[in-house]
């Protein structure tokens, strides 16, 4: 059996990564904070890299530089902390809340998947933030079902596909910023990528009445 990547309290690292990004898309700070806390103490560098990706992939606001600045501040304040010492979580907490509250659209992802196949200003002080990500609780229902998409082993076992993810993650954006490609049919992606038989069957209905961008 291969090595299993586990977080602070034993959760699957990939599940927590999925929860983090999908919770941010949904404007759900509780689940985003919980996942961030699990990753922060086990996969620090990975967590910050994931937040950079999210800032570009899901957020309409110009937040990537804010996330970079918060990462640098986190490193500066916590660099001399010894193993086992409590880290100051304020910077990761603020990063999470900026991303949760940012206007969302999937234009960058659509553009990358369909057009790359061969200034909004933000004031961080206007956004609320939790005192500590460690205060975020998972809740009695456990890990939400929407965590498990085709990027997780459990989601693949459940038969979830790329097209399911494209549809569901577009519909869940919160708060949603109207984008250029909200009604795009993902035609180039469909033509240029090897997709499973289930997606091939689903695609005609998915693309019906959508706009083709070429």
Image (cartoon, rainbow, N blue to C red):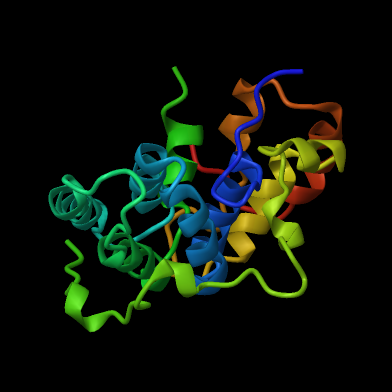
142, above or below 2, in the image: below
Q: Report the front residue among 191 and 73.
A: 73
| Left or right for 1, reference 124 | right
Tell me residue 208's x, y (percent).
74, 51
Residue 137 visible (yes or no): yes
Q: Report the front residue among 144 and 59.
A: 144
Q: Quadrant of residue 152?
A: top right
Identified at 43% across, 68% down, the residue is 133
Total marks shown come to 0
Q: Report the front residue among 50 and 186.
A: 50
Tell me residue 29's x, y (percent).
49, 72
Residue 207 visible (yes or no): no
Tell me residue 82's x, y (percent).
26, 45
Identified at 79% across, 36% down, the residue is 156
Identified at 72% across, 39% down, the residue is 150
Tell me residue 191's x, y (percent).
64, 25
| Left or right for 96, reference 207 | left
Quadrant housing the N terminus: top right
122, above or below 119, in the image: below
């Amino acid at each position: 059996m291969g090595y299993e990547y586990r977080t602070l309290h034993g959760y699957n690292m990939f599940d927590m990564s999925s929860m983090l990004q999908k919770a941010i898309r949904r404007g759900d700070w509780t689940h985003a904070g919980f996942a961030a806390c699990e990753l922060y103490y086990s996969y620090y560098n990975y967590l910050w890299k994931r937040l950079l990706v999210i800032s570009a992939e899901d957020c309409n606001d110009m937040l990537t530089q804010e996330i970079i600045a918060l990462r640098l501040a986190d490193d500066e304040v916590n660099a001399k902390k010894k193993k086992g010492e409590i880290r100051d979580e304020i910077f990761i907490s603020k990063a999470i809340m900026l991303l949760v509250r940012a206007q969302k659209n999937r234009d960058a992802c659509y553009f990358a998947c369909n057009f790359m196949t061969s200034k909004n200003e933000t004031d961080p002080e206007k956004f609320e933030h939790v005192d500590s990500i460690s205060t975020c609780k998972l809740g009695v229902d456990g890990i939400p079902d929407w965590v498990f998409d085709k990027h997780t082993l459990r989601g693949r076992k459940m038969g979830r596909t790329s097209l399911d993810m494209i549809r569901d993650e577009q519909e869940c954006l919160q708060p949603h910023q109207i984008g250029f490609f909200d009604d795009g049919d993902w035609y180039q992606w469909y033509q240029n990528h090897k997709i499973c038989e289930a997606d091939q069957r689903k695609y005609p209905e998915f693309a019906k009445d959508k706009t083709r961008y070429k």
